Amino acid sequence: MAETLEVHPDRALPVDPDQRALARSIFARTQGLPLVSMHGHVEADVFADNRAFDDPARLLIVPDHYVTRMMVSQGVPLTDLGVPRSDGGPTEADPRAIWRRFCSNWKLYRGTPSRFWLEHELVTVFGVTSVPSEETADAIYDQIASVVAGPDFRPRQLLDRFNIEIISTTDPASSGLTHHRRLADAGYGERIVPTFRPDAVAYLDRPAWRDEVRRLGDAAGVEIGAYPHFLDALRRQRETFQRAGARASDHGHDHADTAPLDETVASALFTKALAGGPITAEESRAFAGHMLFQFAAMARDDGLVMQIHTGVLRNHHSAMFAQHGADKGFDIPFGAEYTHALRPMLDAFGMDPGFRCILFTIDETVYSRELAPLAGVYPSVRLGAPWWFIDSPEGMRRFRETATETAGFYNMSGFVDDTRAFASIPARHDLSRRIDAGFLARLVLEHRLGEDEAHETAVDLAYRIPQAAYARR
Amino acid sequence: MAETLEVHPDRALPVDPDQRALARSIFARTQGLPLVSMHGHVEADVFADNRAFDDPARLLIVPDHYVTRMMVSQGVPLTDLGVPRSDGGPTEADPRAIWRRFCSNWKLYRGTPSRFWLEHELVTVFGVTSVPSEETADAIYDQIASVVAGPDFRPRQLLDRFNIEIISTTDPASSGLTHHRRLADAGYGERIVPTFRPDAVAYLDRPAWRDEVRRLGDAAGVEIGAYPHFLDALRRQRETFQRAGARASDHGHDHADTAPLDETVASALFTKALAGGPITAEESRAFAGHMLFQFAAMARDDGLVMQIHTGVLRNHHSAMFAQHGADKGFDIPFGAEYTHALRPMLDAFGMDPGFRCILFTIDETVYSRELAPLAGVYPSVRLGAPWWFIDSPEGMRRFRETATETAGFYNMSGFVDDTRAFASIPARHDLSRRIDAGFLARLVLEHRLGEDEAHETAVDLAYRIPQAAYARR
Amino acid sequence: MAETLEVHPDRALPVDPDQRALARSIFARTQGLPLVSMHGHVEADVFADNRAFDDPARLLIVPDHYVTRMMVSQGVPLTDLGVPRSDGGPTEADPRAIWRRFCSNWKLYRGTPSRFWLEHELVTVFGVTSVPSEETADAIYDQIASVVAGPDFRPRQLLDRFNIEIISTTDPASSGLTHHRRLADAGYGERIVPTFRPDAVAYLDRPAWRDEVRRLGDAAGVEIGAYPHFLDALRRQRETFQRAGARASDHGHDHADTAPLDETVASALFTKALAGGPITAEESRAFAGHMLFQFAAMARDDGLVMQIHTGVLRNHHSAMFAQHGADKGFDIPFGAEYTHALRPMLDAFGMDPGFRCILFTIDETVYSRELAPLAGVYPSVRLGAPWWFIDSPEGMRRFRETATETAGFYNMSGFVDDTRAFASIPARHDLSRRIDAGFLARLVLEHRLGEDEAHETAVDLAYRIPQAAYARR
């Protein structure tokens, strides 16, 4: 007989009975608050098309690299999980077979945030009542499939069901934002907004750089023949994004370097790259740092909030990248430096009331050492929430413990879910609010914070602070 | 009606009832012990003049960069907080207006150690009974002002009231120690002692270096025309400091490098710098490392305890530094390396019974990785307490958890308050003793330490260990 | 009257009563499981000779650098502790005097894992009932001496008493494995197995390199005149080790570099070194990285599990190294980088089902940042247990908290004791199982894991996972 799958009302709350009781009362204040989801990776066409999702495997397994990487780590090939191949070659086509593999490997997720999110989704979104296993796989599949096929299980309808007040997509700088225009026409222009992500045109040595620059020019209606046209096209696209509701830009650089080059040097590098000339790794890195400085200058002028995250070595395994492309679980963090790297940018714009930037990391060591001290003094800086590998119960708890004392609560960005897995969004916010409730409860019981203050702070963290951090400026 | 401001007797003690009860009994042993404050930044003239403090704002807000930086981070200019400008330009002159700004921003300090210290001071030192807010600001101001104006609220009288057995100031190597002589004349020579800080003459490329060297020569009565005179002047001044009661030197270097240069190289660099010749950043860094080695040699000979702390990028924002000078909250830590950097010094002096050094960091990652292993084997090395940004409940707890297992309790320096904010000294020691009590209580309840041992260890940490670490040698 | 020495059944279990009760029930499932000790430093001749141990001091103090370094850190010379001198010069010869020094310094071990292990050994292995002190030293010495002299207190007999199912020694690549042959003849061939450690031939600039290469050739029956012979000899010795039961190789490199050199470059370097030519530090480091890549290729071919650990500066104090040799407590960790360094190796072999590597660190910052992400996606990678300085209650707890969420439980290696101190092996496994029980109990009480799952996971971590991680392939 299959075990019953349940989600306990006290999950992820602290063990101590007094602390749990207080955390429960704090969490009661935030559990029902709308979700502000300002850093996400659900694609705009999902909302624009508003089609039914394909099937349980393609909804929950195939696109979620947290889920697939754990099976890969135990020897399951990505092809067995239906992850598409770049060459169009064959992969598992039977969603039910994929689903069975996942359920048979349920044990692997013990102690991981994926387990928490998946349980939450299975129970509260899909009404599943059995623990996943080889035996229960088919029945669970059928249950989810029946929900997914329902007329109210469409992406836009889920916005209401999930209580999502606003959600941001992530879009290349060259995007024509056609899906967002369709969304605006459908009345979703204020609720589903784009984010301006120009990484593809920031690194001169990437193979697709010239194509991306051409696309950027096309989108902006600018013929990019030289560096000033490039900046002009970027500025125009930022305006277009803002007209489509964008609040922020997003910058996933290898390093946080922000040292500007001499304009003549930058211009010459750009010209060389545009002509297809050889670009060294050092030149590319220097130009990327220069561009981060330029994007900060634009942000100061136009008010887009600038999100920066660094320190990830993408596509660690060449053959897996060649076979399946990016974002397949092979991105590995490394040590990140912010204090020196951000200095040129903050020296120029850090005290400017027109500038706002939010700093993210997955190198936890920089919270207490660099990011909290920066956020705790520069009025332009907000400290982003723990994300990716550390968007987890222990990771979020450590974040509160290491960053709050120096940055304070009010120099933070609030939670960001940062996910491709649409159905996991409520679970992620739910977990974050539980961890915050537990942390605040401890502060109260250690007489470091009043109970009223804790309630107010919880609501601030869950709702008011992210609204304010990403507010139009 | 304003909320009542109180400090709970159990604040900062653990949540678990058994652990709290035991922590309370341990804390009862240390709460009343005298304070040994061997690393501080209250100026000697404050004690020598023994004047009444100006007003609540100039006592508690203006000089405390922990307090001002948090308001700056939310957009309050330093000028609005009365922080003096380097050019003598106007800043807020009304202490009451400064105080109101602070009280209106009370919310910002939630979860920070400043909140803990301020509450402690307001209640136990000033008898304040209302929670700070826009509404209560004036009444609190008046209350504090009346206490501050009292005849027993003078710096020297506070030494008794605060139960400070000994306090150290920090003084440049070139100091004539005139204030300390006045203090000795007044019978405070053993209680208020100087610390020898030669950083200003260690970096050849600092604009004021030549002036500082000249001042050093003047103070030592040595005409410094060449490198050997420089060393001679330093040795003489160390003797003068020791005669004035100094127990320690203090070295706030950018990096922990201690590699000695060839004497001819060092001498040539010194001569070039003295002649105003160009000094590269590399030369300056190399000379600073060389000098750290020289200071260690002097320490081995004269017995001054050598305090080293590194890894802070000072004055991160140029314009704020130009406008307001150093120590205004814009010092940001970066990754620090000690294992390789200290090797030359420890290889030469680390096993020498005449040598003692205390290592500090605000890069927490080096506790378990480098500093605890070093302190756990070299008889000359003591591990300094968490300080600055990590002189906080969570920071101190992490310190105990990450450093104790490898270094042991008895290779630590004991708590240092390291503050300019005189009135906060008791609060800081109080917090440290509470955190230690909580940590020791856990060891007892986990049967890793006996209860008697915990009581003894608590007293050692609070009192005997700092006394011994900074003992005359 | 001496205090009674006891080990509490609940030691190192969590403080919260519910969590402790649950942890107790989880620990009850693992406490009696056999020990799988696949990474150890007890010498093979200890088992082959199976002689009685000398005396309490030479059993418990002299060879244990955890114990001696703590006394050194408080000024006790190694010579006073009987640690042999490289020049054969005099050291303390009276074991009772050594033992007294240790007992008089019992206080120093408060809060350290050595204290936990020693208490466990003294009580459960030796039946000691008094707390060590100057007064009790002699009586304890006599008690231990009487046990040690007993006929059932021989190394092989202790394997049964300690419930050690399999134990691995660590042996240089050039070993003739004569002791292991004697053990095989005595029927211990499957229970006491060698580990292949070729570090001594991997660094071209080490003084003994040429001698070690000659020894390797002698052992392998290969005349090593050039680089291909060198690889051939290594391959042959790996086969010999495997025939003697070896499951793994062990690589303690300074850095985790794995970049292969051009074969011609590697070959030329080897030839130069063999001819006694000058080798720069850069060349030596590059060749060591090259060899790590080669060892991975060999591991892929022959199935030996590859253990890698890096980031330790050995013999930090030159004079102590000259006086007493390696492994005397003067090895100090530094910051380690794995993400970039391991990429060449993992790019080549990381997805190969024939390859298995286990990554260790004592730079804790790389758990959540690098090692857990790598182990969480590469099927060949397992994350090694915390070891050396962090093989401690707090260190192991932090490991679970920082690594589990990203790596999952099933991508770990299980506990390794990594010790020269034979009598401490059961205590180390006992502590590890207690910490795991406490961690799993918290997951259950926070409704992040089912109770049945926790029981199963505990058994997996203690027994099945290390068996599987080091399984013959």
Image (cartoon, coloured by chain):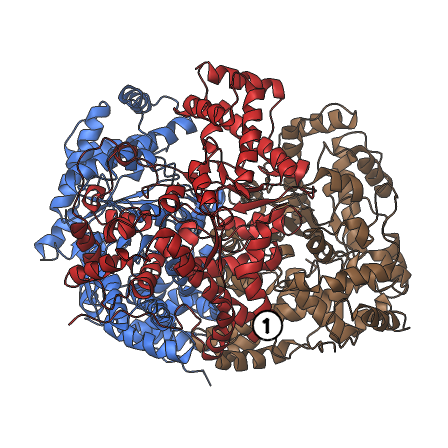
Chain colours: A brown, B blue, C red
Observer-nearest of B355 and C207 = C207
Residue B205 seen in render: no
Crowd tier of the residue under label 1, counting other residues whose Cα lies within 10 Å: few below 14, some 14–19, many 20 or above: many
Q: Position of residue A44 (x, y in %)?
A: 83, 57
| Residue B449 visible somewhere in the drawing | yes
**Vertical placement of residue B268 versus A388, above or below:** above
Q: Position of residue C192 (x, y in %)?
A: 47, 47
Residue matched to label 1: A12
C340 vs A458: above or below? above
> Could you tell whether C67 is left or right of A431 in the image?
left
Does B337 appear above or below A21?
Answer: above
Q: How many marks?
A: 1
The residue nearer to you, when weighing B340 against A200, is B340
Q: Quadrant of the N terminus of chain A?
A: bottom right
Which residue corresponds to the image point at 87% horizontal and 63% vertical from the top-left? A55
* Chain on which label 1 sits: A
Give the residue displayed 87% in from the left and 66% down from the top.
A187
